[in-house]
Amino acid sequence: MNGVLPLCPFPPLHWWYVADGDGAKISLASPFEKQTLRNRIIISGPHGRQVITFSIQHLDDDCSESILLSNHIPSIQSWRSVQTAYGNSPFYLHFEPELKKLWHEGLPRLITDRKSLGNWCIQTINWTAEQIGWTVPEATNDRIPFEGAPFDLRVKSKLRGEDWTYQRYAQPFEPKNGFIPGCSILDALFILGPQELKLRLNELVQPPQNLM
């Protein structure tokens, strides 16, 4: 097995690099860890690196099942953040209608709404793969041991992608903030478009030298 992947909403480039490798699997049984990309995405906003967090509540003891909370109607507020960050990007308008619908249907809009974090992540992964023409790895409910796979992004430090190398592309606010690596796949998709992103994935992100 080449890699083990946790569920994340609109995972970053290094997640997709691992997903594109031989034998990668998505772990549906991974316990939730706080302060990770399991319930958040990173975008390159007008003020620099911006983290959009989706508030959750755990339903079981090991935190593998969680529901999304409205928290002041995040589907509206978080979408506005995406719109502000990428509204002038080359491919934003192309994806906006379908993505906006997915966003508002997948996230809670009222206090009484109960939406699954896992389902939301799966929807965003499937949508992204469909737009770009990637294959989604096999998902499993089996408990996979934390050994044997060179790319196990269930590990908190590895999911952050801090040791990976990212090639610059022209982010909307780069002249002001510099290039911001490790963003959600939406960042590259809105700026580069699906065809270029598919062709250049292994060029845009490279794993740590000790894992190559």
Image: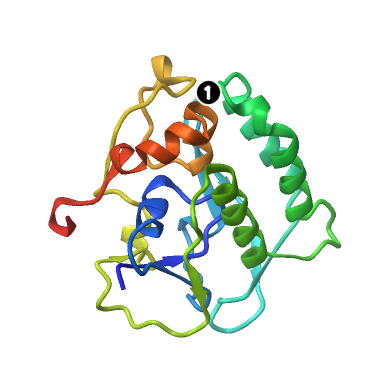
Measured as percent of width and height from the top left, residue 188 is found at: 47, 34
Residue at left offset 36%, top offset 53%: 160
Q: Is residue 134 above or below residue 79?
A: below
Residue at left offset 56%, top offset 76%: 64
- Answer yes or no: is residue 74 visible: no
Residue at left offset 63%, top offset 33%: 81
Q: Is residue 108 toward the left or the right of residue 205 in the image?
A: right
Residue closer to the observer: 130 or 101: 130
Residue at left offset 40%, top offset 46%: 13
Q: Is residue 43 toward the left or the right of residue 116 in the image?
A: left
Residue closer to the observer: 111 or 202: 202
Q: Is residue 176 above or below residue 97?
A: above
Q: Is residue 203 toward the left or the right of residue 121 in the image?
A: left
Measured as percent of width and height from the top left, residue 25 is found at: 43, 70
Q: Quadrant of residue 19?
A: bottom left
Measured as percent of width and height from the top left, residue 83 is found at: 66, 29
| Amino acid type, callout 1 | Pro
Placement of the N terminus among the 4 image quadrants: bottom left
Q: Is residue 47 toward the left or the right of residue 151 in the image?
A: right
- Answer yes or no: is residue 35 visible: yes
Q: Look at the numbered disc 1 and give the secondary structure of its residue.
A: loop
Measured as percent of width and height from the top left, residue 171 is found at: 44, 24
According to the picture, the residue beneath numbered tag 1 turns out to be 46
